[in-house]
Amino acid sequence: MKLRAYFPFLLILISIVLILNFENEPYLETKSTLYSGNSNCVDAPNVATIEFQQSIVTLPSHETYLIQATLRDSGGSIIGIDPDWSTNFGSITPIAGLQQARFTPGELEHTTIWACAGNVNESLTVNVIQGKVENLMITSSKENLTADESAVIVLEGEDIRGNIFTLTPPKQNWTYPEDSLLSISNEVIWNPKNTGWQNISVQESGFSAELSFNVTHGNPIRLSIVGDNILITSDESVEMQSVLVDADGNYLPVISNWSTYNVQASEWLTEFGDTAKFDGWTAGSWKILSEYIHPVSGQYFVAEYDILVSVGELNQILLDGHGLTLTVDDILDLNPRAIDSAGNLISNVDMIWTINGQISTGTLEESNYVFSTESIGLYEIQVSTEGGSASITCDFIHGEAVRIVVTETSTNQLTVKSGETIELLTEGEDQFGNRFAVNVNWSLTNGTGVMNPSSTGIGYYEFKPGDASGFVIMDFSTLGMSEQIVIDVQPGEITKLRIDYDGELKQGNTVRLLISAVDDSGNFVSYCNANSAIVTSEVGKVIRENSQLYMKFEGSGSNTIEVGCYGFKETFYLQVEETILWGIFEDTQKVIIYTSLILMIIITVLLVLMITRSKEEYEEYDDVQPLPLVPISPQPIVPIQHAMPPLPALPLPLPPVPQTPTIPVPQIPVQIQQNNNPPQLQTQVETSEQKLGNAMNLLTNKKSISEEVKTNKAKFEPLSDDDLSWD
C-alpha cells in the first residue's frame, strides 16, 4: 500500500529528470558540434588555413582579449571572410568584417576558443587566471590546536566573474604573533609557539581579513627536512621544509637555519623561513643542512637532506665573437659551448654550421672552429643541433694597407685638360686586395696645380692643373708609405689671350712681353710664338730677339697695346710711368747715378785744373826778371790838350815786403806828335803776369824796394802824384 501511494510521486520525479535530460541533450550536442565539428561553419571552401597571433594566451579573469584570425587559401593569400567563433567557457563576441572576436573569460580554466570556416577549424587556448580581487575571505583548518600542531590558513579571493581562488600574499602582508611561525609556500601554514588566544590578519588587494586561534602546548622529539625529490637535473629545483616532529609523527614547521657544506652551493639555496628552495645548478652531490633550537626548551635539532644533481637538457649553444669588428688579417675563435640551463657543459653534441647561409660544417671542424676570411663584409655564423641553436654576426673590415692606389673617378685615365678639374680617389689596399678610402698628404711642386679635398668624402680630391703641362709627377704619402702618380695635363680650349710684362712699365725701360693663350676660366694653355705673334703699340717699339718679344717704352701715360695670336686679337691697356730726362737712361735711378757721376767728374777736373794752374803760375813768377825802369825824357812835358780819363785811386799801402835789389824806375817815354792831331801819351803797360812778377819781386826784397822808392822819389820830384796812374 505504501509503495503504491508513493508510486505516482516516483513517476513524476522520473519524468522531471527525463525532461531535464532531454532539454540539456541538444545543448550538449550543439556545444560538441560547435566546438569540434565543421557542419555549422561559415561556407568558405577556399579557406585552407586559419592562423592566430598566439596559440596560448594567459589572461586575468577581469580582462577581455581581442583575437585576430587570418584566413588563407592554399596559395597563402589572405581571404577576408569572418569565421564562426565559439568557446567552452566565458563568452565571445565576433567583430564583423575584421576577422576579429572579443573574448570575455568565465571560469579560471584553460579555455579553448574555436574559429572555423569551410572545412577548417582551428583553436587557441586561453589560460584564464585569477584577476582583480573584489572580495576577500579567510578560513582556518582549526581554531583550537596544540603547539605541536599547525593550522592551515586559507585566504581566498573572489573576482568580478564570481570565481573563487586561493591567494598567497607575501609574508610582509601578514600580521601574526611575533613568536609564531608563518610558512608561505603552496599554502599558508601557521605554527604557534606560545599558548593563548592569538590573532592573525592579512592585507591583500585593498581588503583585510582576520582569524583568532586558541593554542595549547606540544613537545617536539626531532627535526626533519621534508622534500619532494632527491634526484634532479640542473633544470629542476627542490622545495624543502624544516619541521619539528612530535611523538605522534606530526610535523610542526619551524623557522630553521638553512645551509650547505659547500660555499658554492650556498648560492643556489634560497631560504623562506621554515622552507627552502634548492636550485639544481652544477652537476654533483650536494648536502642541505637545517638547524633548529627550540625556543622554550632550548633543545638543539639538526637535519640533513641529500640532493643529486645531473646535467640537464641542452639549453643553448654559446659562441664567441658576436658583434665584433675584425680585420681580414685577424682570425676568430668561435669556441662553441653546449650548455644546459644551469650552464653545465654538455659534451658530444652534433652540430651543423652555416656561414651566410652556406653549410660549412666540415671547414669549421677542420679548423677547430677558427674562422678567417680574405673578403670584407658582414658574416652571420649559425650553429644548430637538437634542442638548441645559436648565431653570431661579426663584421670583417679591411686589413693593414700594403700599398696606396690612386684612380680617377670618371674615366680612370689620369688625364685632364688645362683649365678643367678631375676627381681622384686615393685608396689603401691590404694584402688580399681589399681597398678602402684614405686621406693622403700631397706634395706638388710650383706650377703643378692645386689639389683640394673633395666634398664627396674621405679619399676624394679635386685636382686643377697649374702652368705645367704634359706628364706631371705628384708625390703623396700616408700610413707610412710614399708613392707617386703621373697625370697627363693636356691643353684646354683657347678662348682669349693674356699679356704679362717682365719688368717695370716706365718710360725708357725695355720689358719682356709674355703673351699666352688661356681658356675660358683664365687658365694657361700655352705661350704664343714670339716670332709669329702680332704686337702693335704707340707707346714704344717692339723688339724680337732670341725667340723673345721685348718692348722699349718711348712714351708715357695711358696707352693701349694690340696683340694677335692663335687667331685671336685683343687690346690691352697699360700705364707707363714717366721718368727723368724722357727716359734716356731708361730709369730715374740711373739718371741720378749718371748725373752724380758726371758732377763728380767735372768737380775732379776743375780741381785738377786749379791745382795745375796754381802750380804753373807759381813756377812762372819764379822765372820772371824785374822789369827795367823807363827813362824819363829830358824834354819838357807838353800838357795834353784833351781831357784825360780819371785815374784810379791809389792802391792801399802794401804790407812790408822783404828787401829786394834796387829796381830802376821805368822811364815813360812821351812823344809829341808833329801833326795837328792831339798829342797822345804813349806808355808801356805791364801785363798781369808782369805785375804778378813784380809783386813777387817786391816780396823778396823789401829793403831794396823801399830804398829805391826813396831814390826814385827824389828823381821824380817835379812830377806830382796826380800825373801817375796804376795799371
Image (tube, rainbow, N blue to C red):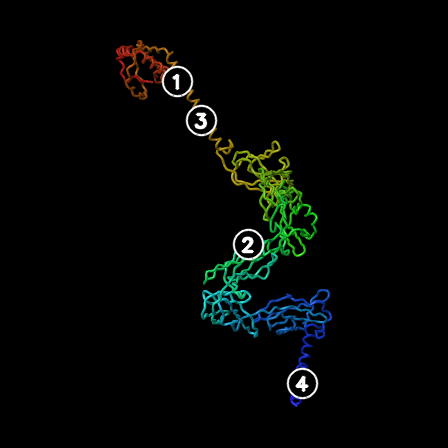
Q: Earlier in the sequence, mark 3 or mark 4?
A: 4
Residue lying at the far front of the rendered structure = 247
Q: Are marks 4 and 2 in contact (CB under 8 Å)?
A: no
Q: Amino acid at mark 3?
A: Leu
Q: Earlier in the sequence, mark 2 or mark 3?
A: 2
Q: Position of residue 588 (x, y in %)?
A: 48, 33
Give the residue at x 55% y 66%: 186
Q: Which residue is mark 1?
A: 614
* Viewer-nearest residue: 701 or 25: 25
Q: Earlier in the sequence, mark 4 or mark 1?
A: 4
Label 4 and label 2: CA atoms lie apart by 69 Å
User: Image quarter for residue 440?
Assistant: top right
Instruction: Bin the neighbour count of mark 2 within 10 Å (Cα to Cα): few under 14, some 14-19, many 20 and up.
Output: some
Q: Is residue 103 left or right of residue 290?
A: right
Label 4 and label 1: CA atoms lie apart by 186 Å
- The vertical placement of 391 against 570, above or below, is below
Whether residue 53 is visible? no
Q: Position of residue 128 (x, y in %)?
A: 60, 69
- The vertical placement of 317 against 219, above or below, is above
Q: Which residue is mark 2?
A: 265
Q: Which residue is mark 4?
A: 15
Q: Which circle marks residue 599 in the picture?
A: 3
